[in-house]
Image (cartoon, grey):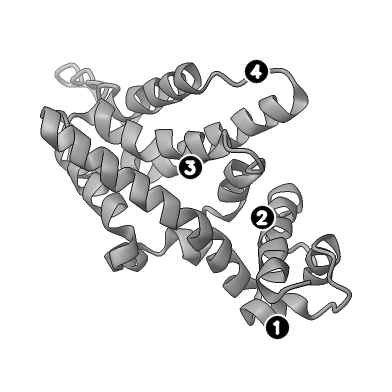
Amino acid sequence: MHIDDSRAALLAAGERLIAERGVEVPLRDIAAAAGQRNNSAVHYYFDSRTGLIEAIVERRMNWLEDRRMRLLAEHEADGTAHEIHTLVAMLAAPILELVGTAGVTHYGRFLEVVRAHPVIADARRLAGADRAAVRIIAARLDAALPQLPPRRRRQRLETMATVMFALFADYERALESGVRTANPEQDAAEIIDMIVAMLTVPVPVRDPAPAGSNRSR
């Protein structure tokens, strides 16, 4: 097997097995699923488990970054690039487009599993040039929620990734089981609407305590 083919097979097997069995799936199982007789193949090509996860993310991120940059340019042109629904759509829709691509069957579930891994969660990674679109969209989402107190806004934006990845994972499972038939535009609209609703639900107003009452009782 050619070196590029071997690497690609390990990436595909890693994405699938991590999605199905978790981050700690034995690396020898990934090597075997990729058709590698050498149990140390992952270490040979990626140095470590973290290196493999980084490579899986980067393989998809290049396409996602390019797609989001093009969407940002389109929405800058039509004047909607700062609207919250558009911003969420620019984050979510490209992943659903990717999931709808032939051969991409486990990426949503992979993201759900690794969402807390430093490869995904470390905010310093947003500083890289390869994450410019995500960085721009995240900053604009923050600015698009001025009605929320800063603490509540930060909490919702942090929760958004968890919710979004869970929705993608459930979507993939439904497609795989046959419970759901892919309808990319409608599916994307539904997921985007749910995320926007989560971000924009009004903060409940607490009723003031009646005069002379003691809430701590």
User: How many neighbours does mark 3 have within 10 angstroms: few (below 14), some (14-19), or many (20 or more)?
Assistant: some
Which residue bears the numbered disc 4? 181
Q: Position of residue 188 (x, y in %)?
A: 45, 24
Q: Earlier in the sequence, mark 1 or mark 2?
A: 2
Callout 4 amino acid: Thr
Callout 3 amino acid: Thr
Which residue bears the numbered disc 2? 15
Seen as rendered, the residue at the extreme front is 2
- Measure the alpha-carbon separation of dots 4 and 3: 24 Å
Q: Within the image, what quadrant is residue 12 found in?
A: bottom right
Q: Position of residue 202 (x, y in %)?
A: 25, 21
User: How many neighbours does mark 4 have within 10 angstroms: few (below 14), some (14-19), or many (20 or more)?
Assistant: few
Which SS class for mark 2? Answer: helix
Q: Earlier in the sequence, mark 2 or mark 4?
A: 2
- Measure the alpha-carbon separation of dots 3 and 2: 18 Å
Disc marking residue 44: 1
- Measure the alpha-carbon separation of dots 1 and 2: 17 Å
User: How many neighbours does mark 2 have within 10 angstroms: few (below 14), some (14-19), or many (20 or more)?
Assistant: many
Which SS class for mark 4? Answer: loop
Relative to residue 133, is residue 89 depicted above or below? Answer: above
Q: Earlier in the sequence, mark 1 or mark 4?
A: 1
Callout 1 amino acid: Tyr
Q: Within the image, what quadrant is residue 179 found in?
A: top right
- 32 horizontally vs 21: left or right: right
Q: Earlier in the sequence, mark 4 or mark 3?
A: 3
Q: Are marks 3 and 2 in contact (CB under 8 Å)?
A: no
Which SS class for mark 3? Answer: helix
